Image: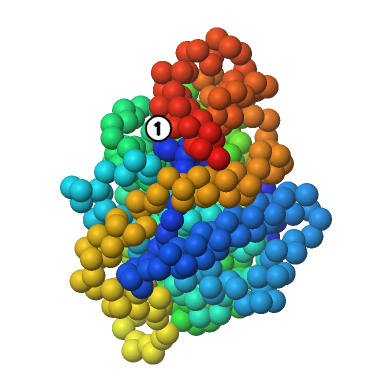
């Protein structure tokens, strides 16, 4: 059950609304609202380095030639740093970004500087998903593992809530208005992919359940009741949908139609949920501490309807889970525990919120003036640096599969000559897709010329 259920993949599928550079120290600006140009430059450099680490880690994992990035992060104690940065940018998105969107005098000529900050969270969770496959990475997170568990719980809770209100936002149905409205839509699309990456990270944490601290186990099983949340994820399956009478699943960064012959095949994301449930319910350490109340019992027994022979053929270890559920059905539910427990609690989110409470409006206005309104020279410089970071040969090397036509999803061999971002199988498909693609293609091409 410890093998990767799928190869790590980059989260580069959310289209940037306007290509251009950024100029922010990033989400940690919420700790230091009085930024200097030097700090902005240092954050840009940090973000570029993170992107390069991310791409190299995916290349190493995909090639199965050892994973030196993971070893370096553990050796130098950088996993806690990544967790802190992840939660800082999450808070920026929740507290500062909405304020920026509401400012009447905020009409940026180029929205890519903000997009880069939004994408910073995606880059970090992508890197963590790649390296957390290794148990030593989970151990090296130390106390921040509590904060990471809380982060994953927040993302999965929002994913369940979203699936109960019509599912994730669909880019193909959106009608973009102003650049800021387009940016907000892109943030919603990115949030969906981030939540799916958080699911994978949580599954890898459960692989280490027997070595986690008592506080972490209590957080997962008692505070958040993750087994019941995972049952809800299986019920809603937000990564699957019906479109035009056909089943589609979200894989490799896009919705893909599943052929009738493949519909009984376990999806990669469903596999992550089942493995996490197996770890949380059948691990000796977790079973000893999970209180099977009447609510938990009722939720878990819903799993029996999913445990078909077809599923057991694909994940044979789930036969043990089926036996556990059969035994659970015959046992009495446990009353909720009322023991007084002294436990460690996460502190990153609370600390950041305490330090900046009441300052969000001031931070947004400061960043409006000094961070998200770069000069033309700054835009040109950052565009050049980003072009060097996102080299097409590297991006193609980490691509999980043959490029697909942006219009009909067939295998594609031709790329848009203007922006180099979209692929097509034929000239006809490119013409049909232009009405939608043109909104992204023109700004991207202008950004390239700015270099």
- 220 lies above or below 178: below
Total numbered labels placed on residues in the image:
1
Which residue shows up at 44% across the image and 77% down it?
A: 218
Which residue sits furthest left?
104
- Residue 306 in view: no
- 293 lies above or below 419: below
Which residue shows up at 34% across the image and 41% down it?
A: 109
Image quarter of residue 308: top right
Tell me the crowding category of disc 1: few under 14, some 14 to 19, or many 20 or more residues within 10 angstroms, Cα based. Answer: some
Which residue has dot 1 on it?
Answer: 171
**Residue 121, percent from left and from top:** 47, 57
Image quarter of residue 342: bottom left
**Residue 429, percent from left and from top:** 54, 14
- 75 lies above or below 101: below
Which residue shows up at 60% across the image and 23% down it?
A: 417
Q: Name the one closer to the observer, 126 or 110.
A: 110
Q: Name the one closer to the observer, 398 or 260.
A: 398
- Residue 218 in view: yes
SS at mark 1 in the image = helix
Q: Is residue 397 left or right of residue 101?
A: right
């Amino acid at each position: 059950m410890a093998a990767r259920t799928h190869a790590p993949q980059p989260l580069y599928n959310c289209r940037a609304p306007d290509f251009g550079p950024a100029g922010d120290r990033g989400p940690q600006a919420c700790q230091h609202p009085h930024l200097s140009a030097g700090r902005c430059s240092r954050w840009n450099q940090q973000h570029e380095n993170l992107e390069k680490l991310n791409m190299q880690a995916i290349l190493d994992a995909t090639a199965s030639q050892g994973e030196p990035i993971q070893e370096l992060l553990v050796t130098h104690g950088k996993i806690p740093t990544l967790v802190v940065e992840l939660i800082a940018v999450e808070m920026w998105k929740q507290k500062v970004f909405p304020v920026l969107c509401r400012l009447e005098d905020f009409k940026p000529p180029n929205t890519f500087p903000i997009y880069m900050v939004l994408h910073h969270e995606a880059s970090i969770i992508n890197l963590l998903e790649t390296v957390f496959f290794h148990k030593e990475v989970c151990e090296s997170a130390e106390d921040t593992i509590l904060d990471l568990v809380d982060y994953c719980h927040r993302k999965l809770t929002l994913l369940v809530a979203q699936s109960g209100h019509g599912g994730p936002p669909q880019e193909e149905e959106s009608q973009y208005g102003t650049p800021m409205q387009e940016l907000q839509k892109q943030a919603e699309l990115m949030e969906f992919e981030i939540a799916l990456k958080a699911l994978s990270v949580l599954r890898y944490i459960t692989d280490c359940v027997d070595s986690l601290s008592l506080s972490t186990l209590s957080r997962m099983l008692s505070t958040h009741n993750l087994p019941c949340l995972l049952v809800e994820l299986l019920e809603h399956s937000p990564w699957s949908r019906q479109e035009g009478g056909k089943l589609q699943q979200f894989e490799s960064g896009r919705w893909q139609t599943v052929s009738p012959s493949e519909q009984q095949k376990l999806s990669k994301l469903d596999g992550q949920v089942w493995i996490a449930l197996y770890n949380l319910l059948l691990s000796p350490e977790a079973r000893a501490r999970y209180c099977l109340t009447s609510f938990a019992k009722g939720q878990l027994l819903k799993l029996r309807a999913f445990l078909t022979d077809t599923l057991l053929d694909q994940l044979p270890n789930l036969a043990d889970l089926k036996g556990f559920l059969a035994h659970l059905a015959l046992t009495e539910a446990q009353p909720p525990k009322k023991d007084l427990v002294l436990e460690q609690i996460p502190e990153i989110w609370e600390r950041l919120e305490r330090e900046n409470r009441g300052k969000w409006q001031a931070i947004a206005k400061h960043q409006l003036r000094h961070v998200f309104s770069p000069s033309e020279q700054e835009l040109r410089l950052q565009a050049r640096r980003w072009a060097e970071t996102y080299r097409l040969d590297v991006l193609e090397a980490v691509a999980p599969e043959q490029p697909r036509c942006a219009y009909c999803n067939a295998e594609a061999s031709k790329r848009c000559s203007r922006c180099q971002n979209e692929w097509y199988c034929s000239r006809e498909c490119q013409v049909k897709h232009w009405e939608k693609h043109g909104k992204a293609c023109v700004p991207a091409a202008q950004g390239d010329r700015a270099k």
